[in-house]
Image: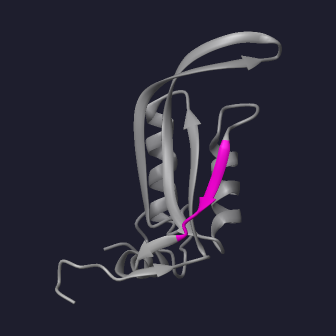
């Protein structure tokens, strides 16, 4: 196998969690906390996106920013707890999906990056 070919493996323990925030500042802050705490391997913020929904019986539209993170199934409860603790919405959209197939090197990186989470209240305490 040449260096440009990836070996694909079937996995059950890797997930992508996503949520939406009302602005990019909050989304970026949560992304930073999750990565620095080694709860997720990486985080992407995208937007703004236009959301249309019903809230308390009323039609609403708003601009939002999507936060998407990659982590392990083991870290998922801590990630969701951290998102909820920093989320301004009364009922935040938090969804997760398992990966089925992932390149072996990417899977290994996610697992290594989320090993031994640090206390994210101490920024950069174990980061290089």
Q: Which residues are magenta?
A: 94-100
Q: Nearer the viewer, residue 8 or 39?
A: 8
Q: What residue appears at the point 34 percent right and 83 percent down from the top-left corner?
A: 7
Residue 20 in picture, x, y percent from top left: 57, 36
Query: Residue 8's image quarter?
Result: bottom left
Q: Nearer the viewer, residue 75 or 82?
A: 75
| Residue at the farthest top position | 58
Q: How many marks?
A: 0
Residue 31 in picture, x, y percent from top left: 47, 51
On screen, 76 above or below 95? below
Q: Nearer the viewer, residue 88 or 51?
A: 51
On screen, 8 above or below 64? below
Q: What residue appears at the point 61 percent right and 58 percent down from the top-left corner?
A: 97
Q: Main secondary structure of the magenta part?
A: strand
Q: What residue appears at the point 49 percent right and 38 percent down from the top-left corner?
A: 66
**The C terminus, quarter of image:** bottom left
Q: What residue appears at the point 41 percent right and 49 percent down from the top-left corner?
A: 44
Residue 118 in picture, x, y percent from top left: 53, 73
Is residue 31 one of those drawn in magenta? no
Q: Nearer the viewer, residue 100 or 90?
A: 100
**The N terminus, quarter of image:** bottom left
Query: Residue 125's image quarter?
Result: bottom left
């Amino acid at each position: 196998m040449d260096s440009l070919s990836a070996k694909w493996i079937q996995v059950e323990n890797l997930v992508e969690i996503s949520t939406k925030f009302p602005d990019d500042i909050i989304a970026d802050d949560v992304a930073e906390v999750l990565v620095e705490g080694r709860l997720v391997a990486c985080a992407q913020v995208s937007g703004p996106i236009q959301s249309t929904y019903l809230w308390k019986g009323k039609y609403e539209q708003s601009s939002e920013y999507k936060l998407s993170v990659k982590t392990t199934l083991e870290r998922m409860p801590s990630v969701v707890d951290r998102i909820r603790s920093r989320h301004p919405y009364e009922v935040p959209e938090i969804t997760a999906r398992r990966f089925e197939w992932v390149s072996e090197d990417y899977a290994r990186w996610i697992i290594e990056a989320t090993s031994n989470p640090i206390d994210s209240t101490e920024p950069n305490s174990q980061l290089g």
